[in-house]
Image (cartoon, coloured by chain):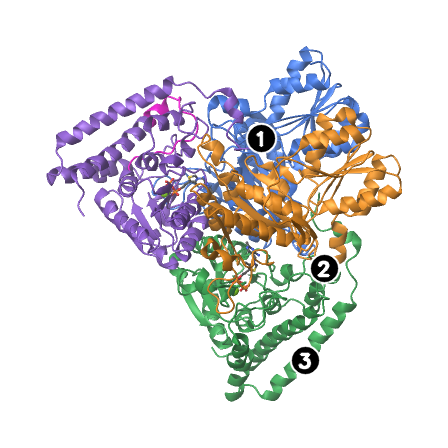
Chain colours: A orange, B green, C blue, D purple
């Protein structure tokens, strides 16, 4: 039975259900158990934005607060994953990956290959990304292109409460290391989510809107910007197909190509910085694999090649918006 | 060496300015007009002040997310700071940094930092520059109990010792990292105990007592200026507000903050001490209170009235040349 | 006066000349001063492969050995760069960036922007990259695509001794943070290098071979593979133009586009992993900016999406070779 | 608790196997047939052996770049190790890892590691798993003096203490990190002094003395199994060969290694002690020497004859599912 719940609740529910189902699932992170050793209320926080609130009460010492030492505890999650547990570690903001990247990309990602198949590392690293919170340059980045570059990591970027729950359950059940990226501006977004547990397979993009003229490939929070643009463009009699990648690694190139073969035009919309990004990735694959279908140049709509600014007006300009998408679509339609 | 009257007045003004700045931000944040994450330093003023009173233009500090106090201590312009926190074009960083990234390199304030533990390596670098260039300057890294566990902090202690840098590491232990107790996260009794692991003096000081901080800081700065190397100092102190604005602090004890304010407030203590010893009069301090209140009032008013950054600023200041 | 010297010597010479010229240039890294505190020969090593050997003897304590704490010393280089020095820090292998990435991408790269122009950070991080040394998964990566993704970092990948010297001198004189990437398999490559100091500007790609049929865009060690392929293809009467990027950030898109506008065909050759890489970057920009000129699909030749294997035969298969480039060129020529 | 005769024989065989393995690699590397970076453990055998003699199937170890000794100690197959170092398809990791990435998770050997300081967080994880799953197992991280400064190492000490993990941290201090002296890079006198900074016992032990290591290791393992938490142990020892094969070691003192070999060799010491105490006879030890020599001969021969990995292996083993 589906109810209307938030993206944040969907994530909490996925965690609770998987912990219920499988004793080897454990949680760790800063304040995820609410603030260890403090004199006041138990379970006061549930991570910085409350996503894990209540889980410590339910699962006790399977939910562990950590010192602020991301290398040590992300690495511990990785080591525990090769030793019989299925840890879900919270890296509070994706921006903090710089203090623990080694344990993610040289350890977790590479064990299986380096050890000749002689290792499984079922670890999930949940992390918050994206701009829009006036949180400035060190708390607003996307950075999933960096993880996508690394062989051995799976990278997940849910755009709705339904996907958040299903993809997180898949992440926990998956036997490879997964970076699970939660857009902070989506936490309050509500949507229909089944009560029971379900898993959404990786590498299956979602065609969230069908259309004939242009394919818009996007992901995460930008999905909603794409829909806003598509709605507006419909009034101009331009019909957009919208593809939500859901996971950037593995990436569902088949669905992208199929769509471009139908529409003949591609706009890629990504909140990341422009260089070596998902936007360039999707564009390059289409230019290689579906060139013959293209009737017009590809256009990329991304954030600019600058850090995320603090001031409200600048940050609003920084984030790609529906207007930019509409303009890009008009350009590929030859209507600008 | 006792402080002169001018120095006492300066110290009080510094502490009071920090306090008023933070108390006012607390009020203004609640109105919803201040964007982003704001971490207040109220309660911890004696630490920034006790250290910064020893510093001059040769010296540099690296700060953390709770950086307003350090910035005021190092002489950043209060109006420009306030404008920055409001995200205005005339802010100290043109509105591009905000509370977590306030910096003024011309004043030796190397930046607040959004990354816990990010500052200490930078302070090592500033100390190295002072040493190589022979300026006689020192560098201070201010960081919290939570940050004291971060690998970058401990690596920096080791590097400063190996390179014998004029660098001072100040752990501002306010008992919490977000909601987590320092008793849980810091495996040893006092964070300063770790100094011996890096062959440097380790000092614990009452961070509510300006005079105690001032003295410990003075020794460390002297040591550093004389080329004798780094020191680790832990200030035990308390923050009055939540980890950031919006935090209800339910993880803290009932009336914990109320009791702290009533009993160990650093400004109250300073006032009691200097007046009872007849070093300064209540009236002299009250004058400063009034001036500071006016300063902060003015800065909020000006910040609110200031224009946002020009849209073109989105794309400037990322590279010097390209 | 130019002499024939190696890539490694060219780098050492650039360092020595800049240290001579400017007192604020200092060097730091593991064993770059030869092994501090050890009882034997002074200056025994000069970094792990001897690139800085001799500099400690010449410049004394301006060349500093460090403990194995990359966060601390790279961060110290960054902090010193904002305090009047121009440090050149050696990150022994690029693969080690995972233990110090924060100081590179959240600190050095962002200061200028976050602080509203109120900071200059003239730091150079020299680092060794690339496969071919049987050094396996944690010592053979390229990873410059990760740095290229980050606004605020300049990324340099010299392919010859001449470029190594000129680009390193530019890096040291540049006022922005620079990641200077040295391919370990190029150290012994010899070439003509002027004795005097000279700087090669960033963002100017080098057309190292002119041709009419296909543009091959490449960089670093792969430049030589591209030339090998172009030589072989010339015998098949296919004329290749080869573009060496030299710097991936800034990237000289003008030269790329101009070349593709002449040839109408593009092959991108990069030793990196395929996802979110320089190959996708160049392809995407061409598909957006020079689509009209393209007569055929773009083809990317890259390493596969797997870690670098140890076994000799596997590593040889891993590294893109001239045969693959020839095949790709034939494909875009419609001759396969 | 004195070692039984079987245990003594086992310990000697372990040490001797490591030594022969490494001495032989030194010879074979010089022929140019062994690819990549090879870091030899010769001289340090008493450390791996003293610890691993206490371990069983429940237990796990995380190793570093100098990992052959730890691997042999934890029971990895010598033939498969040799084949791996030669990059053969029948190697322990199918030829994909090589010397720096030898691992056998089925034996509790979590992997050598190419990243200095990379192993300790992983060992914390294995210890956490043992604790959560109630297996009674312990985890050991072996790392060098150079690695002891790395942030990841110190963070792990703190985490193991905070979580009270059954984890043992072994600093194998061989005096050098590459060419750099540990006296330069480690700011305190002994690396084990840092234990108190993390509220755990710190022990310095003579790493040339198997019996001393064995005893210290036993106490730490017991403590960990009893749920009493982590221990930091520093073995002072020496490496006989260069940092990696090909290193001429000119940074070391003249005749330094020659003298070490002559005076404090761990195998010589072991032999002298057990024979003089009449615990084992020279003849019994000689038999082992002969068996080990044959084992290593065989492993090199088999490795050389083994085929390279199949080309298709380039693309396997990266994901379990995709
Ligand atoms: C690397 C990193 N991890 C986590 C955070 C999130 N965070 C910001 S402040 C903070 C607590 C810091 O505690 P402490 O060092 O004691 O300083 P305090 O806030 O008490 O002044 C945390 C966990 C961060 N900004 N950076
Ligand atoms: C993060 C990182 N930095 C640097 C290196 C290069 N490196 C490999 S081994 C080594 C020295 C390690 O010294 P120590 O920890 O004392 O171990 P030992 O080699 O003496 O056994 C260095 C610097 C690395 N592999 N990883
Ligand atoms: Mg604190
Ligand atoms: Mg060593």
Question: Residue under mark 2: which chain is it in?
Answer: B
Q: Which residue is at the far front?
A: A1
User: Is D277 located above or below residue B162 in the figure?
Assistant: above
Secondary structure, mark 3, is helix
Q: Can you tell which mark lies on residue B291?
A: 3
Q: Is mark 1 within 8 Å of ligand 2?
A: no
Q: Nearer the viewer, mark 2 or mark 1?
A: 1
Q: First in sequence, mark 2 or 3: give its number.
A: 2
* Circle 1/circle 3 CB separation < 8 Å: no
The residues colored magenta run D25-43
Residue at x-position 61% and y-position 86%: B284
| Residue picked out by circle 2 | B95
| Residue picked out by circle 1 | C305
Front-lying residue, D26 or D108 = D108
Residue A284 visible in the displayed image:
no
User: Is B82 located above or below residue C33 in the figure?
Assistant: below
Residue at x-position 69% and y-position 70%: B30
């Amino acid at each position: 039975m589906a109810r209307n719940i938030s993206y944040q609740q969907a994530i909490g529910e996925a965690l609770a259900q998987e912990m219920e189902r499988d004793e080897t699932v454990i949680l760790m992170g800063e304040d995820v158990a609410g603030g260890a050793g403090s004199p006041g209320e138990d379970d006061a926080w549930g991570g910085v934005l409350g996503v894990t609130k209540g889980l410590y009460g339910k699962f006790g010492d399977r939910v562990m607060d950590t010192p602020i030492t991301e290398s040590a505890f992300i690495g511990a999650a990785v080591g525990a994953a090769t030793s019989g547990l299925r840890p879900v570690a919270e890296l509070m903001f994706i921006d903090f990956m710089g203090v623990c990247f080694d344990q993610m990309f040289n350890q977790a990602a590479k064990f299986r290959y380096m050890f000749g198949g002689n290792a499984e590392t079922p670890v999930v690293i949940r992390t918050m990304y994206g701009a829009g919170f006036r949180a400035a340059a060190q708390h607003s980045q996307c950075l999933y292109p960096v993880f996508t570059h690394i062989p051995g990591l799976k990278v997940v970027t849910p755009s709705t409460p339904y996907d958040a729950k299903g993809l997180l359950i898949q992440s926990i059940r998956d036997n490879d290391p997964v970076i699970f990226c939660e857009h902070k501006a989506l936490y309050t977004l509500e949507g229909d989510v089944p009560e029971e547990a379900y898993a959404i397979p990786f590498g299956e993009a979602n065609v969230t809107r069908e259309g004939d003229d242009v394919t818009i490939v996007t992901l995460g929070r930008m999905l909603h910007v794409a829909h806003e643009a598509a709605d507006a463009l419909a009034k101009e009699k331009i019909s957009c197909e919208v593809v939500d990648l859901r996971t950037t690694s593995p990436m569902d190139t088949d669905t992208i190509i199929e769509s471009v073969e139908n529409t003949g035009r591609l706009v890629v919309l990504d909140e990341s910085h422009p260089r070596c990004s998902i936007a360039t990735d999707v564009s390059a694959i289409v230019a290689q694999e579906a060139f013959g279908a293209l009737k017009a140049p590809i256009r990329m709509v991304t954030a600019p090649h600058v850090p995320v600014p603090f001031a409200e007006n600048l940050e609003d300009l920084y984030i790609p918006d529906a207007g930019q998408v509409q303009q890009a679509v008009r350009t590929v339609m030859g209507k600008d | 060496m006792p402080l002169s009257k001018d120095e006492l007045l300066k110290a009080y003004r510094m502490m009071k300015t920090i306090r008023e700045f933070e108390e006012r931000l607390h009020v203004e944040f609640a109105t919803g007009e201040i964007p982003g994450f704001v971490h207040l330093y109220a309660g911890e003023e004696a630490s920034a002040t006790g250290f910064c009173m020893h510093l001059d233009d040769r010296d540099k500090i690296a700060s953390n997310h709770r950086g307003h106090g350090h910035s005021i201590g190092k002489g950043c312009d209060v109006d420009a700071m306030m404008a920055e926190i409001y995200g205005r074009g005339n802010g100290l960083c043109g509105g591009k940094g905000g509370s977590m990234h306030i910096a003024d390199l011309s004043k030796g304030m190397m930046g607040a930092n959004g990354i816990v533990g990010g500052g200490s390596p930078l302070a090592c670098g500033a100390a190295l520059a002072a040493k190589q260039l022979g300026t006689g300057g020192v560098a201070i890294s201010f960081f919290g109990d939570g940050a004291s566990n971060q690998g970058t902090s401990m690596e920096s202690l080791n590097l400063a010792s190996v390179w014998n840098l004029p660098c001072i590491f100040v752990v501002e232990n306010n008992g919490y990292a977000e909601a987590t107790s320092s008793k849980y996260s810091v495996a040893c009794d006092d964070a300063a105990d770790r100094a011996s692991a890096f062959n440097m003096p380790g000092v614990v000081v009452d961070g509510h007592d300006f005079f105690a901080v001032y003295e410990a800081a003075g020794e460390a700065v002297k040591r550093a200026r004389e080329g004798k190397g780094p020191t680790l100092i832990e200030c035990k102190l308390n923050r009055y507000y939540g980890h950031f604005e919006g935090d209800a602090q339910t993880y803290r004890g009932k009336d914990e903050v109320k009791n702290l304010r009533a009993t160990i407030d650093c400004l109250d203590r300073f006032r009691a001490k200097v007046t009872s010893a007849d070093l300064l009069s209540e009236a002299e301090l009250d004058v400063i209170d009034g001036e500071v209140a006016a300063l902060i009032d003015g800065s909020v008013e000006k910040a609110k009235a200031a224009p946002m950054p020009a849209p073109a600023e989105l794309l400037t200041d990322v590279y010097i040349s390209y």
